[in-house]
Structure formats: structure tokens, C-alpha cells
Image (spheres, helix red, strand yellow):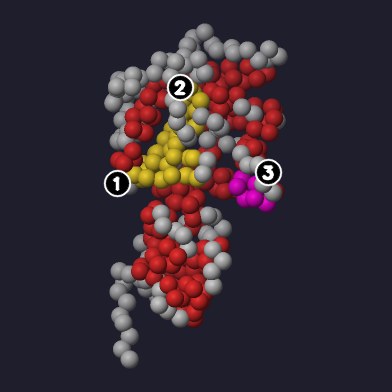
Amino acid sequence: MRKRRVSSEDTMANGDGRQLSARQMVGARLRHLRLHRNLLQETAAKAINASISKISRIEAGIHPFRRDDLLRLLTLYGIRDHFQQEALLSVALGHREPGWWDSHDVPLKDAVLLRHEQVADLIRIYQPHLVPDLLRTEEYARAAYQARHYPSPNQAATEAHVTTVARRQQTLRARGTRLWAVIDEAALLRIPGGDLDMHLRQLDALAAASQTQTVTIQVIPTASPYLPAAEPFSIFRVPDAHILTVHRYTGDEITDLAAAEHYGLLFDQLIGAAARRRAETSQILAAIRNRLLSPSGEASWPAQTPPSRPVPASTTISSAAIATTPSTGRPPNSS
């Protein structure tokens, strides 16, 4: 019987060791997803009208992948999100080299976020609750992860998270990715786990990072007249697109920024309400540090750093002093 010819467009052709490694990584992910749904190989085989032997070979990474088969399996396994599907398909069909985040040990929903993070040349972040992941010290990352979960996660899960955060930071530093973070002052006053010394070291790390050329940190003071009712979000400038990720309690929601343009405007408004220069940021961080060490706990804002006024809601382009638009993502004057 004549076998159907599989086109190179639909499959990753047999190739060198890197291609085999990529197939094995995808196969392990598929097996993990199937087991997570408590499904037998027989059920997966029926979904793509194939034999159990073929499912075994796919999961072992020794059988070429077809797009249609993969989409049916992912749907069966409950993966219907376009970004999550493309994260796996792009590796399976040889459209990109796999990264460390493509391992089945990293949840697929997290792998999507990490993929955008690792290819972006500019990342804009708003964080009202805690120090952003990409600016955390190891000990702060550990305390924040435990504080965000109840009951507290076990040590293995916590250390795995801390290791992932450190790896993300290392990769971004190596690539020279620009990071632009707007943080609410309340987030910097909150001490995860109650360890003040740990928190002070985190503030010192933020002050040091704010002096580098690739990091811009702006703080919205508690005295600001602008209080945005927004959850944490990130905007990734990737080739040919801006990707928005809203970090909700139920998980990250990812979409193209073009479909939610108000977040670009919101970021402009946030930077208008925050300190705009490196000197101001350093002064604010020092004031927060002093406040935490003060027995009275009273605010001690430097007299020369009054709270900034926000950009009016009707403003679609930031003022000349800020000079930024959602499309360019140009940081403010950081002199």
C-alpha cells in the first residue's frame, strides 16, 4: 500500500541530534499533558485515528509530527489557548529552536510567558503588589512565592520557582533586554514573610539596578492623586508585535496589545504619576528604607521629590517630558 507523503511544512523532518532532542522534548510534554488528564494512550490514538504504537513513538520523540495530529491531541488534553498551542507547535514543526522553558517541567502556560520574555527586546511591567519577578533577589523571590500561596508550598516547589526566576534574570542580562518597571510604593513597603533585613537588601538591589543602562524603575508614591484600579501586567516588545500579559490570580491572560490598546494608555498614565528620573527613584527607595527603619513608621519623603501629577486620562501620548508611546516603548529621561 502506498504511504501518504508527509510534507516538510507539516512536519519536522528527520535530522540531526538537535532535531531529535526537540522531538523528545515535545513528546515528553505531550505525555505529561496526557497523564495530567488521566488519559490512556488508547484514547489519544482514537483522537487522531492512529495506533497505540504511534502514540508511543510520538511521546518518545521518534515519530515525525503532523500539525493536525498535534492540534487534535492538544484539544483532547484541554489545551485550547492559541498561544499555548503555538508554543508547542513552533518547536514540534521546527520553526524555532527549543528553549529551557519548553521542558515539560515548566507548565505550558508559563512556557508561553517565558518564551515572549526571552525574545523581547523591551519589557514594560506594572506591579502594584510586590517587587516584579525580574528584579527580585533570590531570598525575596523565595519569600514572595511562599507568601502568595496558602497553604505554603513545599520546599521543592519553592526552590524550583526560585531557580526559574534566577534563570530568567540571567538570560535577560545576557541578551541585554531593556526592562522598564513601574512599581507602587505600597509594594515596596510590604515585607513578604516579615523578614525586614531581607527586604532591605531587596531595596538595595533595586537601587543598584536602577543605575544600570538596561533597567528603568519608577515608583508611584502613595501620596499620588492617581490610583489605578489595575492588576499587574507586562508588555513585551517582540519582533513585529507587542504582547500583553495580565497577571491575574487565576493565571496569566495573554493577548496582542492591539486587542487591548487601553493598557498601552494605562502604562503612559502610570509613568506620568511616577518618579521620572534615576535620581528621584534612588531618593524614593532611600526614603522607603528609612521609613521601614524608623520607629514611628512615618513617611519621610525627600522635600525635593514631591509626588508627581498623573497624565490626564484624555492624553493619548505622554507629555514631552516623558516622550513615549505604546508603539515605541521608549523609557523616560533617566539622567
Q: Nearer the viewer, mark 1 or mark 3?
A: 3
The residue carrying pointer 2 sits among few (fewer than 14), some (14 to 19) or many (20 or more) residues within 10 Å by Cα, namely: some
Give SS at disc 3.
loop
Residue at the image position 66 percent from the left and 15 percent from the top: 297
Characterize the magenta stretch by its predominant secondary structure: helix
**Which residue position holds label 3?**
151
What's drawn in magenta, residue-wise? 156-162
- Report x, y in % for residue 262: 34, 33
The residue carrying pointer 1 sits among few (fewer than 14), some (14 to 19) or many (20 or more) residues within 10 Å by Cα, namely: few
| Whether residue 54 is visible | yes
Tell me the amino acid under the disc marked 2: Leu
Q: Sequence-wise, which precedes: disc 3 or disc 2?
A: 3
Q: Distance of mark 3 from mark 2, alpha carbons? A: 31 Å
- Report x, y in % for residue 330: 35, 31
**Which residue position holds label 1?**
240
**Which residue position holds label 2?**
227
Closest to the observer, 263 or 221: 263
Magenta stretch containing residue 246, yes or no?
no
Residue at the image position 51 percent from the left and 25 percent from the top: 184
Q: Quadrant of the C terminus?
A: top left
Closest to the observer, 169 or 232: 232
Give me the disc on residue 122: none
The residue carrying pointer 3 sits among few (fewer than 14), some (14 to 19) or many (20 or more) residues within 10 Å by Cα, namely: few
Tell me the amino acid under the disc marked 3: Pro
Q: Quadrant of residue 106?
A: bottom right
Residue at the image position 65 percent from the left and 42 percent from the top: 150
